[in-house]
Image: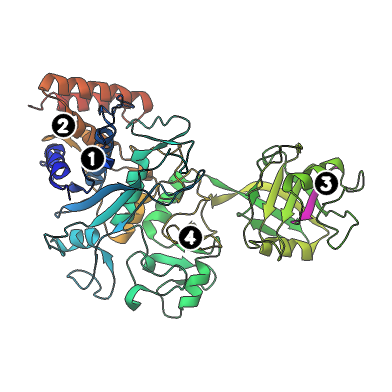
Amino acid sequence: MNKPLLASALALALAALSGNADAARVVLYNLDPAGVGLNDPTPIAPTGANPGTTVGEQRRIAYLFAADLWGSVLQSDVDIKVYASFAPLSCAATSGVLGSAGPNWIVYNFPGVDPNVLYPSALGDAIAGEDLVPDPQDPGDIASQFNGNLGQPGCLESFSWYYGLDGNTPPGAINFLNVVMHEIGHGLGFSGFLNKTSGALLAGLPDVYTRLAYDNVSNLRFTDAGMTNATRALAMRTPGRTVWDGAEVSAQAPLILDEAVLLRLTGSLTAGYTYYGTAAFGAPATPANFSGELVLADDGVGPDTADACEPLPAGSLTGKIAFMNRGTCGFEFKALNAENAGAIGAVIGNVASSGTPGTAPGMAEDPAITATIPTLSLGLAEADAIRAALPGIDISLGTIPGRLAGGDANGRVQLYAPTTVASGSTFSHFDTLLSPNAVMEPNITDTLHAEANLDLTPALLDDLGWVLNPGNAKIGNCTTNVDVVGDGGLIPGANVQAWSNLCLRTSPSKAVYQNCMSAYKDRALAVGILTGNQGGKVAACAAKILK
């Protein structure tokens, strides 16, 4: 293993934090052999304020930057040790795994905690104030890997890694820093240790993450008396049923999440559905264009006369929103038939015979035809409820005051619970309904800016028992006026410290360091990470650094 190179580089990177008693120290161990992954010698131009001139150097710089960010956010007297490498992870031409990570060690029965609760070793060390797994042959707290084949034939072919540190991810690229921040988050504790398929607890013991998961049907936490393996398993594959029951996440959620847009039904069925599928064709459904009486389509041809796989009578749906069963013909074909019959919108409901009846499907376009009306889909349970209640239903899209996008009716944030278990994603992520997109959702998007905003992730780590840095950023021994961690998951001070460390690592002199920090200050002011007064204080502190 090639450990010394990045371990020593990180010691230099964190020298600026040595005077900050509130900061943790994240130590990176490079497990890649020479010539590949983090050591790839392929030349590359500096990009997005990442000054590296080879692929491997840019990867190391970005990973060290992520280590500095997390080290600034968290408090621990014990080093947080992270293994890092690139590997050919599971991949196909249009989809694939970007990275994977988790705790390398699980600890329990140490001072200061319930002895029967499992903890990731990094959190256990921080609580205990000592290294609970001191074995020098395997010191890592977190093991992480990243997809080394991305962009190659057969693996996310139309994408590439973006190693910039400025958050300006170009089209067709995946921000490596966002992915690293996400994966380290798993290793820090954003991960449940139970079996996602059976619901069984690891070694029959609760873990610190799972004990804060809540089932909205049984109204019990996952580790309460009365919860069974089967109940946990069902909750983890029922969208909307599993939520996070931590006080800090619930308190921060209204600062971060948008109001939820629900599919609302009134009349013979009063309900609000947050889980619905959208179409790649037609007008996007909005509160302005999706409202009216819901009418069952009838094409007159069995065995299913409501599948709209045959033309619908002219004028039969004029001014109405059509409800159609999912069937053997395409989604856009159904929508076009409804549109030709006068419908202003459409809902396609799953049926028991469909391949994934519980899931509201996404609906692909048909290049041979063009439907223009807004079209949504529903899973089996919701569709069955509508079928039983028709006619006499009015349907619309709209918000409900206080209901958050990705939150339940009580303000608890939903965890990812797809109907088909995804072993690497189910339960150990926030739900994909969160809006805006969150760092710890299963899908990384270019809307994320983990270099400056970790949304609900610090709050969840706080719920687990991590202590967040309560102070201002420091450059050397100089205190800035910038909070390391602010409300709503903002981490402006962590960003300041990470940039100071990067400039120290890459600057051969004080003058070059100050030029590097001046360029950073200008970028940070331009995008709103810093205010004018904060920028001035950062510059003043940077001027005191002696190279």
**How much space separates mark 1 and mark 2, taking CA atoms?**
10 Å
Report whether 507 appears left or right of 73: left
**How much space separates mark 1 and mark 4, taking CA atoms?**
30 Å
Q: Would residue 453 be seen by someone viewing this image from the given angle?
A: no
**Label 3 is placed on what type of residue?**
Lys
**How much space separates mark 4 and mark 3, taking CA atoms?**
38 Å
**How much space separates mark 4 and mark 2, taking CA atoms?**
40 Å
**How much space separates mark 3 and mark 1, taking CA atoms?**
57 Å
Residue at 44% x, 29% y is 170
Pointer 4 residue: 422
Of the numbered discs 4 and 3, the one sitting upstream in the chain is 3
In the rendered structure, which segment of residues is drawn in magenta?
Answer: 319-326
Of the numbered discs 1 and 2, the one sitting upstream in the chain is 1
Mark 4 or mark 2: which is in front?
A: 4
Pointer 1 residue: 64
**How much space separates mark 3 and mark 2, taking CA atoms?**
64 Å
- Where residue 514 sits, quadrant-wise, is top left
Residue 247 sits above or below residue 338 on the image: below
Q: Secondary structure at mark 4?
A: loop
